[in-house]
């Protein structure tokens, strides 16, 4: 028995060398019919054996030669959020001087196979086919390679050849746009400033043209004399809020849906702060993903959240992770602990430690259909609580905290 072809496995067809399961069955039938017919002298069985052998011989020319179809894959956007459209376009081109044979393009998408029929193509002509990738859940998906499968009309033999490289598509967690928290604890007179920093504080940022409403005491007369128009000193508030986010990954506190909500909550916090160019730190379980010593972009942070899974954490583990996290991020002015159905007693150690260094905010994520752990959970006067039965409810609760 021949070794199973990797390409065949990718296409979803079980092959034994060039033979499909049907081809092996026809070959075995030919051998058995010939032996029994020759032994017993039955002409009918000998005819059947000859017909089976003829079918296999006729199938050979259909799989010989190289593929005449070149396949190119394009995606408008390979990074989408859960629920958004992820469309793939395959352009199939006949590169030979002869008409192409009808073939099937088998494209691996994660753990499944997408089969796209390729029509008969004239020399040099092309055809496009589109298909959509499901985006119901966050995932890192390998798309491709595109495998051109050629077989005979009876599917007795098949030959596969890869015609494109594999690419990666990301289905990020769903996010909401969130407002930043009020300004941080310390005013750093030498800290970074930007044009988007809140105006009106003591940190000098730049000299800019005068606009109606500016304080005339801020007019910079030397620049005004040089440019011929009124110029003012632009002062900004550089007390930027530094939010640290800790995701409790203990599977005992979540259902499948509530953990997805927790990941979306964290993704919303991280993406919103990073897109506003505000300092943000992220720790998933016991691993720091974004921080002072772990620089990251929005995409790299969302990629980490896309691939994160549950990991057992005891209440003591949450406390230890909180302490280590705040030690690594001394500039954090607030710590958001996103957790499942932990009680206030289980989080008392983490919150007690956090409140000495930052403003603790606890985000309990519960299944909206569950009646357990709804009342009396996370009711500590030392921490602000923002309940999150869903991402939309969390966004409304966060807006109250960020006022």
Image (cartoon, helix red, strand yellow):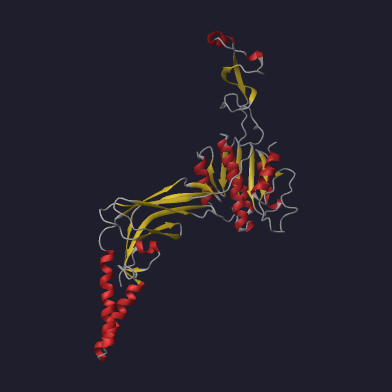
Compared with 259, 241 (above or below) is above
Count numbered badges in the picture.
0
Question: Would residue 170 be found to the left or right of residue 211 on screen?
Answer: left
Coordinates of residue 51 in the picture (x, y in percent): 28, 79
Residue 323 shows in this picture: no
From the viewer's perspective, is residue 388 above or below residue 61?
Answer: above
Q: Position of residue 268 (x, y in %)?
A: 59, 44
Q: Quadrant of residue 370?
A: bottom right
Residue visible at 49% across and 50% down?
86
Q: Vertical placement of 43 versus 309: above or below?
A: below
User: Between residues 364 and 54, which one lies in front from this camera angle?
Assistant: 54
Quick one: quadrant of the C terminus? Answer: top right
Rendered image quadrant of residue 288? top right
Q: Position of residue 10 (x, y in %)?
A: 39, 61
Q: Nearer the viewer, residue 243 or 216?
A: 216
Residue 341 or residue 113, whichever sits in front: 113
Q: Quadrant of the N terminus?
A: bottom left
Write the residue at 28% across / 65% down: 62
Determine the residue positioned at 65% across, 42% down: 354
């Amino acid at each position: 028995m021949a070794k199973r072809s990797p390409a065949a496995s990718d296409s979803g067809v079980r092959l034994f060398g060039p033979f499909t399961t049907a081809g092996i069955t026809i070959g075995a039938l030919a051998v058995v019919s010939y032996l029994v017919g020759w032994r017993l002298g039955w002409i009918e069985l000998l005819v059947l054996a000859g017909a089976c052998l003829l079918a296999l011989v006729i199938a050979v020319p259909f799989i010989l030669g190289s593929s005449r179809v070149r396949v190119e894959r394009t995606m408008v956007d390979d990074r989408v959020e859960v629920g958004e459209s992820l469309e793939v376009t395959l352009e199939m081109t006949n590169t030979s001087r002869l008409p192409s044979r009808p073939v099937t393009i088998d494209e691996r998408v994660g753990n499944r196979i997408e089969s796209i029929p390729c029509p008969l193509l004239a020399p040099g002509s092309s055809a496009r086919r589109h298909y959509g990738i499901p985006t119901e859940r966050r995932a890192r998906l390998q798309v491709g390679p595109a495998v051109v499968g050629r077989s005979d009309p009876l599917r007795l033999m098949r030959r596969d050849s890869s015609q494109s490289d594999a690419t990666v598509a990301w289905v990020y967690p769903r996010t909401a746009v969130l407002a930043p928290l009020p300004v941080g604890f310390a005013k750093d007179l030498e800290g970074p400033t930007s044009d988007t920093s809140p105006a009106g504080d003591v940190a000098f940022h730049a000299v800019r043209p005068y606009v109606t409403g500016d304080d005339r005491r801020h007019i910079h007369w030397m620049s005004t004399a040089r440019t011929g128009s009124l110029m003012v000193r632009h002062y900004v508030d550089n007390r930027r809020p530094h939010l640290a986010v800790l995701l409790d990954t203990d599977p005992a506190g979540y259902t499948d849906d509530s953990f997805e909500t927790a990941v979306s909550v964290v993704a919303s916090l991280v993406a919103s702060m990073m897109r506003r160019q505000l300092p943000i730190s992220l720790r998933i379980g016991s691993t720091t993903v974004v921080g002072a010593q772990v620089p990251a972009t929005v995409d790299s942070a969302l990629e980490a959240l896309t691939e994160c899974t549950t990991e057992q954490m005891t209440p003591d583990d949450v406390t230890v992770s909180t302490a280590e996290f705040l030690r690594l991020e001394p500039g954090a002015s607030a710590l958001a602990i996103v957790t499942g159905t932990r009680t206030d007693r289980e989080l008392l150690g983490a919150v007690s430690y956090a409140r000495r260094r930052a403003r603790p905010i606890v985000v309990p994520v519960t299944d909206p259909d569950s009646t357990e752990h709804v009342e009396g959970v996370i009711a500590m006067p030392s921490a602000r609580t923002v309940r999150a039965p869903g991402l939309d409810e969390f966004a409304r609760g966060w807006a109250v905290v960020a006022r």
